[in-house]
Amino acid sequence: MLTTSEAGRLRSFVDAGLMNLEDLLPTAASNTGAVALRYWLWNWVSKQVQAKVKVADKEAIRVGALFDHKDKPLAPGTNLEIYRDDNVSIGVEVRQPSRRLDINRLKLLLINTGRISESELDEMIDAATNDTAPAHLFRSTLVEGNSGNESHKTVADTLY
């Protein structure tokens, strides 16, 4: 079992390794360029980490440290430890499911009862519908090549 000091050192070591990645960045010509480089770096790291987490999830399911929650979901409100050894504990908290209105099914049900016409219902739905804010996808790429005119896109996306 890790001592509190050992666990703290491990977290600090990982944090320091991540922060030291900024030291690998080239010197930017401006403060804005430096910020843009850091933006690219952390988006790139995030993409790489997400890929590693996906692989680790599959491995953890395969060896039994996690269970396949898509195949065998637990009941909402469940909060329990599912794995523990000398070094790590893994828990799961099952949140309440969200509800989604199937507008097409509702329209079919209402129209088939004969209580409302399709055109009346469409007008009501249009009047009660709000548009959400559009998603913004920011892409950061490294500009590569001797002349600076060539670029090789190493895309890291951030969706807001």
Image (tube, rainbow, N blue to C red):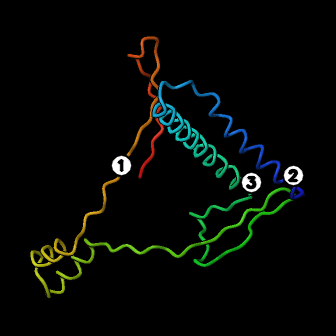
- At a point 41% along the width and 75% down the height, the residue shown is 99
The residue tagged 3 is: 63
Left or right: where 106 falls relative to 141:
left
Q: Quadrant of residue 153?
A: top left
Q: Nearer the viewer, mark 1 or mark 3?
A: 1
Left or right: where 70 falls relative to 117:
right
User: Going by the picture, which residue comes out furthest to the front?
Assistant: 31
Disc 2 residue type (three-letter):
Glu
Q: Residues within 10 Å of mark 2 (few under 14, many from 20)?
A: few
Nearer-the-camera pick, 76 or 106: 76
Q: For the residue labelled by badge 3, is the local secondary structure a helix, a strand or a loop?
A: helix
Left or right: where 96 falls relative to 101:
right
Q: Quadrant of residue 23?
A: top right
Vertical position of residue 8 compared to residue 47: above or below: below
Percent of width and height locating residue 105: 27, 74
Q: Earlier in the sequence, mark 1 or mark 3?
A: 3
Q: For the residue labelled by badge 1, is the local secondary structure a helix, a strand or a loop?
A: loop
Percent of width and height locating residue 94: 60, 72
CA distance for labels 1 and 2: 41 Å
The residue tagged 1 is: 136
Q: Earlier in the sequence, mark 1 or mark 2?
A: 2
Give yes or no for contact between labels 1 and 2 (Cβ–Cβ under 8 Å): no
- At a point 50% along the width and 39% down the height, the residue shown is 39
Disc 3 residue type (three-letter):
Val
Nearer-the-camera pick, 89 or 38: 38
CA distance for labels 2 and 3: 26 Å
Percent of width and height locating residue 32: 45, 34
On residue 160, which mark appears? none
Disc 1 residue type (three-letter):
His
The residue tagged 2 is: 6
Q: Earlier in the sequence, mark 2 or mark 3?
A: 2
